[in-house]
Image (spheres, rainbow, N blue to C red):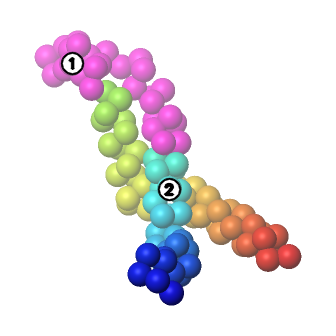
Amino acid sequence: MSDLTVSADLLAPAPTAPGANAARMRETAEAFEASFLAQMIKPMFEGLSTDGPFGGGEAEGTWRSFMIDAMAKQTVKAGGIGLADTVVAEMVRMQAEQSVGAGA
């Protein structure tokens, strides 16, 4: 082997730890659940007026979507509604089917 030859082992993709993959799936599932919850929460605020002595005026209407997103993320952080668990289980099932299909 000459000095300019690259080992095939160096060109192979780095193996990912099973825990890292599971953590990414969980993170993705929780982001999906937060997005779903935000869409469910949004209609609750559509009819609210921002007028009055304690209303935020135009700024409240402008920043309301950020507040809704934060509420949804906090709900997921506190345990959510179980949607992320279902999504993770489905992702694991699909990944297992894919690996069985690739091995055959």
Q: How many numbered markers are drawn?
A: 2
Query: Which residue appears farthest toward the right when viewing the image?
Result: 104
Between 13 and 3, the one lying in front of the other is: 3
The amino acid type found where label 2 is placed reads Thr
As for residue 50 lying within the magenta part, the answer is: yes
- 98 relative to 20 in the view: left or right: right
Between 22 and 58, the one lying in front of the other is: 22
Q: Is residue 57 visible?
A: yes
The x, y position of residue 17, in whole percent, is 49, 79
Residue at mark 2: 28
Between 73 and 79, the one lying in front of the other is: 73
The x, y position of residue 54, in whole percent, is 16, 22
Q: Is residue 16 visible?
A: no
Query: Bounds of the magenta span?
Result: 35-63
In what element is the residue under mark 1? Answer: helix
- Say above or below: 82 vs 21: above
Disc 1 and disc 2 in contact, CB within 8 angstroms:
no
As for residue 100 lying within the magenta part, the answer is: no
Q: Main SS type for the magenta part? A: helix
The amino acid type found where label 1 is placed reads Ala
Residue at mark 1: 59
Say which residue appears at 48% left-offset and 64% top-offset.
24
- 41 relative to 48 in the view: left or right: right
The x, y position of residue 9, in whole percent, is 53, 81
Estimate the spatial distance between the alpha carbons at disc 1 and disc 2, rounded to whole Å: 31 Å
Say which residue appears at 50% left-offset and 34% top-offset.
39
Looking at the image, tell me whether mark 1 or mark 2 is earlier in sequence order.
2
The x, y position of residue 18, in whole percent, is 53, 78
Q: Residues within 10 Å of mark 1 (few under 14, many from 20)?
A: few
